[in-house]
Amino acid sequence: MPIIHIKTDNTVNAEIFFWKIEESITELSDIIADGGTMLSQAQERFKSTKRQCEWLATRALLMQTPYRDTGIQYCSNGQPYLENSNMHISISHTAEFVAVAIADTPIGIDIETKNRNAIAVADAFLQPHEAEMLYVNTDRDKEALRIWTAKEAAFKLFPDRSLVLKNITASLQQNSGNTSLYTITYKDGTTATCRTTEHDILVLSICTPQ
């Protein structure tokens, strides 16, 4: 059976659902129990078995939530939305985990495992001044990963605002224990707030409009 964690984040009025993928694609299809329709869709969409599992696990996870009667569709920019619902959804996956955030306001979510080496791809997402600040940090690996997830969540919040993560600025406003609070600024001046926290082996970022 999967491990499901349900967390209500009252700071942004969002519900966050996690699923640890321990099933094969056929086992996930059996959980969904739709006669194999979604399994066929997953196999048509993705060549990778891993991506097929992530896609199916996301839908199996949604069925364990109060939003089980809605379906996931996608806008032309790739942003997901819930059918027949006024709620907003964002999706993320890493390693064997998938996560879904559902809120009454636009939302972006990103999860990464703590062992993800964000420093190795720093040039792809850090602006020069962010890199300078990062390299005076005593735990730069951890901070780089937090910034990475914050920017990924920010991109998912407003995918049309920025073509690349490097065009998004993440300014640290508060760092307390396992939580960092960032002000996000997009290239066009739009701003948002991102809260990044650590949960077990995961780093989680939730981004919402200011």
Image: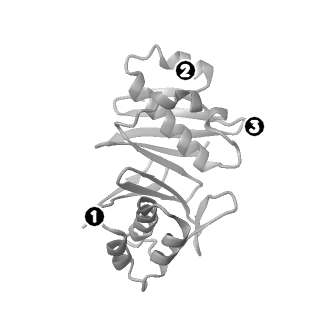
Q: Amino acid at mark 1?
A: Pro
Task: Tell me the quadrant of the picture where the N terminus can be found.
Answer: bottom left
Tell me the crowding category of disc 3: few under 14, some 14 to 19, or many 20 or more residues within 10 angstroms, Cα based: few
User: Does 20 sit left or right of 181 as displayed?
Assistant: left
Label disc, if present, on residue 193 of the rendered structure: none
Q: Say which quarter of the image contains residue 197.
A: top left
Label 2 SS: helix
Query: Residue 129: image x %, image y %?
Result: 60, 18
Contact (CB < 8 A) between labels 2 and 1? no
Which residue appears farthest toward the right when viewing the image? 188
Amino acid under disc 3: Asp
Label 2 or label 3, whichever comes before in sequence order:
2
Tag 3, which secondary structure? loop
Image depth: mark 2 or mark 3 in front: 2
Residue 188's label in the rendered image is 3
Residue matched to label 1: 2
Upstream in sequence: badge 1 or badge 3: 1
As measured in the structure, the alpha-carbon distance from the residue carrying label 2 to the one carrying label 1 is: 38 Å
> Visible in this render: residue 176?
yes
Q: Residue at x 45, y 34 (%)?
A: 146
Residue 112 placement, left or right of 122: left
Q: Position of residue 11 (x, y in %)?
A: 46, 46
Task: Give the colour scheme of this rendering.
Answer: one colour
- Say above or below: 20 vs 152: below
Q: Residues within 10 Å of mark 2 (few under 14, many from 20)?
A: some
Say which quadrant the C terminus sits in. top right
Q: Nearer the viewer, residue 205 or 144?
A: 144
- What amino acid is found at the position of numbered circle 2 in the picture? Ala
Secondary element under disc 1, as helix, strand or loop, is loop
Task: Tell me, for residue 131, which label it has, or none.
Answer: 2
